[in-house]
Image (tube, rainbow, N blue to C red):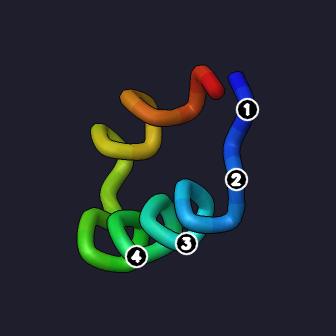
Amino acid sequence: MHMDFNDLFHFLEELQQNNNKEWMDANRKW
């Protein structure tokens, strides 16, 4: 899966807003 800078920035924003184990488990596959 290719991630460009905008995808990474969006990911980090969501990470800060959803910093919990369930969210991490759901997004670890990439």
Q: Quadrant of residue 9?
A: bottom right
The mark that comes first in sequence, 3 or 1, is 1
Which of the two labelled residues, at mark 2 and mark 3, occupies the earlier sequence position? 2
The answer to whether mark 1 and mark 2 are in CB contact below 8 A is yes
- What's the distance in space between the residues labelled 2 and 3, CA to CA? 9 Å
Name the residue carrying label 1: 2
Indicate the position of residue 7 as horizontal and vertical percent values.
54, 55
x then y, percent, for residue 21: 37, 47
Instruction: Evaluate if marks 1 and 4 touch, with contact meaning CB atoms under 8 Å apart.
Output: no
The disc at residue 4 is 2
Report how far apart the C-alphas of labels 3 and 1 lie in the structure: 14 Å
Q: How many marks?
A: 4
Identify the element where label 1 is drawn.
Answer: loop
Mark 3 is surrounded, within 10 Å at the Cα level, by few (under 14), some (14 to 19) or many (20 or more) other residues, namely few
Residue type marked 2: Asp
Residue located at (59% from left, 21% from top): 29
User: Which residue was labeled with disc 4?
Assistant: 13
Q: Earlier in the sequence, mark 1 or mark 4?
A: 1
Q: Quadrant of the C terminus?
A: top right
At x 70% / y 53%, what residue is drawn? 4
Q: Which type of secondary structure does the marked residue at label 4 adopt?
A: helix
Secondary structure found at label 3: helix
Say which of 14 and 2 sits in front.
Answer: 2
Which residue does the numbered mark 3 point to in the structure image? Answer: 9
Relative to 21, say whether 16 is above or below.
Answer: below
| Horizontal side, residue 13 vs residue 7: left or right | left
* Residue at 40% in and 76% down: 13
